[in-house]
Image: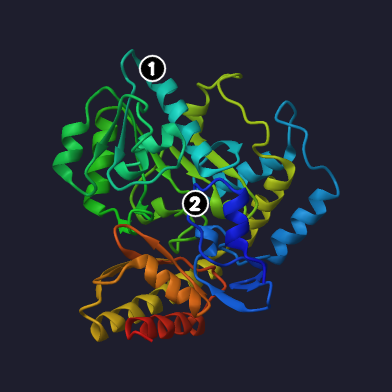
Amino acid sequence: MTDWLKEADEHLIPFIKRMPAAFVKAKDHYLWDEDGNRYLDFTAGISVTNLGHCNSAVDEAVKRQIDTIQHISNVYVIPGQIELSKLISKKSFDGKTFFLNSGAEANETALKVARYAGLKKRPGKTKILSLEGSFHGRTIATITLTGQPKYRKGFEPLLGDIEHVEFNHMDSLKSKFDDNVAAVFIETVQVEGGVRLMSNAFMKTLVTLAKKHDAMIIVDEVQTGIGRTGKMFGYQWYDIEPDMITLAKALGNGIPIGATHIRNEIAAQISPGLHMSTFGGNYIACAAGIAVMNTIDDKMLGHVAEVSEYIHSQIYALRTEFPSKIGDARVRGFLAAIDLIGLDAGDVMQKMLDKRICVLRCGENSLRLVPPFTVGTAEVDEVFAALREVLMGK
């Protein structure tokens, strides 16, 4: 077997601490290494392959596109962008879209639009609010938005006029809002922050304050969008009409794509030259995105909701069995976090990998389960049987 970790150390910049596994084949919710060992994937490539690995509809669309035309740049009209924008509008709100290559780029675009639109309203309306515990990307601008100091340390000075509000804390929210706020960035579920769910009361107050101070609401749907929560978009759990949403990850089911979707009245303020992306919305990425949007339907979302309830019941059973090792847990759709007590989440990840099951970590010390939509109760049982063995020291 190739020593992939050694090869990676020799040739790749060590920005990432990699797990000791390398996969050469994937289908649905399974991965295979070069020796033919099969692994059950409950990571979905970090909330990317929602439809499962190598989904046939996406594969066929991409293969057809590769043989037709691959790239020409945004100097020209790309018909797939128009079709994909229409699909996003149909399943969210009527608006216009700019396509990019990642979630961080989509959030940077939304930030630029917010600042630009704020300044057009009046001088000084440039403040951006974000939430403590949030995650919006790894560029300088998006780590400034991100409400986790560990991602910002060592990269100062950061972008100015961005302030953070305590998550689900009414008084903190009220104290930060004023007429200088151009926009507030939110995640309805803070996935990297520990799968923390925004309360209805906090959202209601946020919407009221945004209207009062003429501020835009930008919802980062990079991880919560495309059915992950059991609804098409995470914001649809709430009584809210966002001004912008940002998408990436599962929009391409493994093909890199990002999108910033903006209400028409805001998009009307944009003029050519304010932003650009060479590869954004290329033919291949849009072909994948169109296939994804046409594949997800109410039946699939219903499956996510149904299996999500089963995941919740299995976590409850595990907490009952291991009260000294399992703390709080949070579940929404196919997003689940299990707080560990006296165990390191990284160590548990490794022990699960040893049992050929891929899981993630999040928050302070939580295990994260984000499976593809192809899994059912049998696969959930397999994961929790393995986790039970890990908790028993086996």
Quarter the N terminus occupies? bottom right
Image-quadrant location for residue 28: bottom right
According to the image, label 1 marks what residue? Answer: 119
Q: Which residue is mark 2?
A: 16
Q: On the image, which quarter does residue 155 sit in?
A: top left
Q: Secondary structure at mark 2?
A: loop
Q: Amino acid at mark 1?
A: Leu
Q: Position of residue 129 (x, y in %)?
A: 30, 34
Give above or below for 25 relative to 275.
below
Gap in Å between the C-alphas at discs 2 and 1?
38 Å
Nearer-N-terminus badge (2/1): 2
- Percent position (x, y) of residue 318? 30, 82
Disc 2, disc 1: CB below 8 Å?
A: no
Q: Nearer the viewer, residue 388 or 332?
A: 388
For label 2, the crowd category at 10 Å Cα-Cα, with few meaning under 14, some 14 to 19 and many 20 or more, is: few
Residue furthest out toward the right: 67
Q: What's the residue type where badge 2 is placed?
A: Ile
